[in-house]
Image: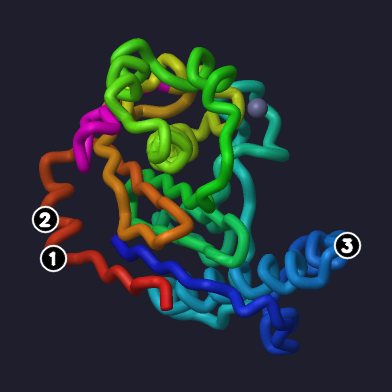
């Protein structure tokens, strides 16, 4: 397994555009804000370069597809996969502001999420997003840290639902990600997903963002993370 992350400069690099797919270029062109457009292009180009290392081909030659959504069956927002080359490598990508994060694993589902810290409407979100025991946990979180802690908890849930393939349609309040522990074993099942127990862990965070990784709760995971993974910190 490999985990890569980076921070876009907000400046467009022509080389980045050259290796994007026609669909990615279309999405790039649809941004009205040039900085957001450049952040998008940088992230997608960098992810292509990272995946190209493990797939051993040209970054521009990679083609992505989407599995049918585990919730509604449509493929517009299903779990992304590598369509070309033919491979058992799975990957997950997340972006927020200038930051991007990508994890890839051979023959293993993986989900990542990265969120910039921001004000949240904790009062109305808590009852929908948090499980009962998570709400109890948040009673002990000082008000000044509550938004940040909520975002951290959110990234863990998103990492799990992205790995399972249900994404935005998941009932997040049913997923308990044990925010009081650095890593937690999480029960969550989705249609068409053979995994129902996940290991979720925080990834290195910055002053203004949190990120999390979810993988099937194999016993071998500790080995993967300790010996086989390469984590490139955001620079
Ligand atoms: Zn759906």
Report whether residue 164 is seen: no
Q: What element carries label 1?
A: helix
3D distance between C-alphas at marks 2 and 1: 6 Å
Q: What element carries label 3?
A: loop
Report whether residue 106 is seen: yes
Q: Mark 2 points at which residue?
A: 223
Query: Where residue 186 sits: x, y (%)?
Result: 28, 27
- What's drawn in magenta, residue-wise? 178-189
Is residue 167 rendered magenta in the image? no
Q: Do the residues labelled 2 and 1 touch (CB within 8 Å)?
A: yes
3D distance between C-alphas at marks 3 and 2: 44 Å
Query: Where residue 63 sits: x, y (%)?
Result: 63, 64
Q: Which mark is residue 91?
A: none
Q: In the picture shown, does residue 225 fall above or below 228?
A: above
How busy is the neighbourhood of tag 3: few (under 14 within 10 Å), some, or many (20 plus)?
few
Residue located 32% across and 55% down the image: 203
Q: Give the quarter of the figure containing the C terminus.
A: bottom left
Q: Name the residue under label 1.
A: 227
Nearer to us of marks 3 and 1 is: 3
Q: What element carries label 2?
A: helix
Q: In the picture shown, does residue 195 fall above or below 30?
A: above
Q: Which mark is residue 32?
A: 3
First in sequence: mark 3 vs mark 2: 3
């Amino acid at each position: 397994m490999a985990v890569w992350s980076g921070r876009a400069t907000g400046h467009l690099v022509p080389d980045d555009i050259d290796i994007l797919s026609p669909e990615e270029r279309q999405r790039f062109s649809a941004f009205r804000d040039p900085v957001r457009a450049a952040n998008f292009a940088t992230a997608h180009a960098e992810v292509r370069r990272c995946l190209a290392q493990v797939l051993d081909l040209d970054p521009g030659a990679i083609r992505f597809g989407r599995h049918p959504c585990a919730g509604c069956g449509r493929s517009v927002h299903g779990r992304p996969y590598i369509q070309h080359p033919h491979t058992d490598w799975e990957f997950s990508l997340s972006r927020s502001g200038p930051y991007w994060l990508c994890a890839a694993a051979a023959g293993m589902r993986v989900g990542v999420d990265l969120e910039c810290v921001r004000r949240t409407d904790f009062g109305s979100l808590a009852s929908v997003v948090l499980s009962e025991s998570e709400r109890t946990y948040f009673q002990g979180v000082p008000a000044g840290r509550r938004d940040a802690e909520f975002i951290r908890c959110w990234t863990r849930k998103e990492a799990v639902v992205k790995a399972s393939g249900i994404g935005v349609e998941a009932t997040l309040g049913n997923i308990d990600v044990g925010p009081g522990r650095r890593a937690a074993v999480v029960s969550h099942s989705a249609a068409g997903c053979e995994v129902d127990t996940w290991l979720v862990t925080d990834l290195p965070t910055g002053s203004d963002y949190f990120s999390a990784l979810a993988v099937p709760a194999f016993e071998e995971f500790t080995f993967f993370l300790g010996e086989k993974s390469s984590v490139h910190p955001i620079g």
